[in-house]
Amino acid sequence: MTTAKGRRGSAPPPFTIDMPERQLSPAIYASPHSGQHYPPELLAASAVPEIVLRRSADSFMEELFAAAPAQGSPLLRAEYARVYLDPNREPWELDPAMFSEPLPEHVNAASLRVAGGLGTIPRVAADGRDIYRRRLSFSQAETRVRRIYHPYHQALAGLIDQARGAFGYCLLIDCHSMPSSNGLVDGEGGPRRADFVLGDRFGTTCAAELTDRVHQTLSDLGYRVLRNNPYAGGFTTYHYGRPAAGVHALQIEINRRLYMDEEQVAPSPDLAEMTAAMTRLIADVRRLPPTAFEPLEAAAE
C-alpha cells in the first residue's frame, strides 16, 4: 500500500511528467500540490512537526490520476512540497512579515492568499501554525522561485502548446484535494459535505459543456458535486484558462475523507475505489467530442 513520505537524500527535479506513448487526448492533468520532497533546510527551519507540514499536501494524486498516460494524456506533478513552494500562486505572492528585509516592488504582498498565510512561500501550516522559527531572506525566495516555480510553469505551458498544436485546443485539469473539515455543504445548506468541487472561475475559464460533462460523470458515480464554492479555481485556472483561445482550465477538488486518513496522511482502503472513479473520469474526458471545446460565444454563432 502506498504512503506519502517526504523524500530524503538528493534533491529531485522540480517536476515529473508522466507522458503517454502517444498523446490521444487534448486533456492535460496537473498536480501542483502533491509534491513530497521536504528539503532538509525546510525541516530544520520549521517550528512544526513534519507530519503537520505533510497535511498541507494533496497526497496520492499520483495514484488517483495514474491512468492519465495510458489514456493518452500527460500527468504533470510537482516534486517539492507545497509548504516549501506553491506553484498554484503568482510567482511573487509573499508576506513581508516572513522576511528579514524589505521586499521589492514587484512582490504582491496584498493578495488575499498572502493575508491567509498561503502565498507562494506559505507562512502557515495546515493547522494554522507558523511554519518558520525565523524570518527568511528574500534571496531564499528568489532561489525557490527560480529553481522550482518557473520550471514547473514552463513545463505546463509547453504541454498546453503541444496539445493545442495537435488538437487545436486543450483542457487543463488541475488536480487538488480538500480537507473534509472545511464545512462544505450542498446547495440547499444540508448537512452532507461535498465530495467534489469543480472550479471554472464561474464559467470564465472553461467551456460550459466541458464542466457539465465532468460534473455529470462524477454525479453518475454517486458523488455530490458543487461548483465554485468555496473553490472557484486558483492561479493555474485563471492564468491559463482562455476558452476563446482554445485553452480550457478546470480545477477539481476531491474530499480527502473519500480515500485517506487525513491525520496520518495515509491511504485508506477506499483509495482503490477513488482511483477507479478517476480512471472512469479520465476515460470520459478522452471521449469528449470537439464541439465540447467550443466556448459559449462560438457555440451560439
Image (cartoon, rainbow, N blue to C red):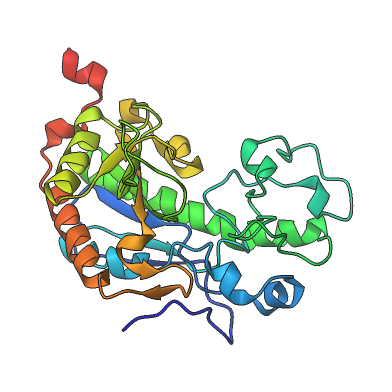
Q: Residue furthest bottom?
A: 9
Looking at the rendering, which quadrant does residue 48 occupy?
Answer: bottom right
Identify which residue is drawn at 43% across, 48% down: 157
Q: Is 293 or 151 nearer to us in this picture?
A: 293
Name the residue rendered at 33%, 27% in the picture: 203
Asked if residue 72 can be seen in this view, the reply is no
Residue 274, placed above or below residue 138: below
Foreground pick, 247 / 42: 42
Q: Along the line of sight, which residue is nearer the eye, 131 or 183?
A: 183
Residue extending farthest to the right is 101
The residue positioned 72% from the left and 60% from the top of the image is: 130
Query: Quick one: which residue is furthest to the top in this view?
Result: 301
| Residue 254: % across, % down | 34, 54
Q: Considering the image in quadrants, where does the C terminus appear?
A: top left
- The relative height of residue 277 versus residue 21 in the rendered view (above or below) is above
Residue 112 appears in the picture as rendered: yes
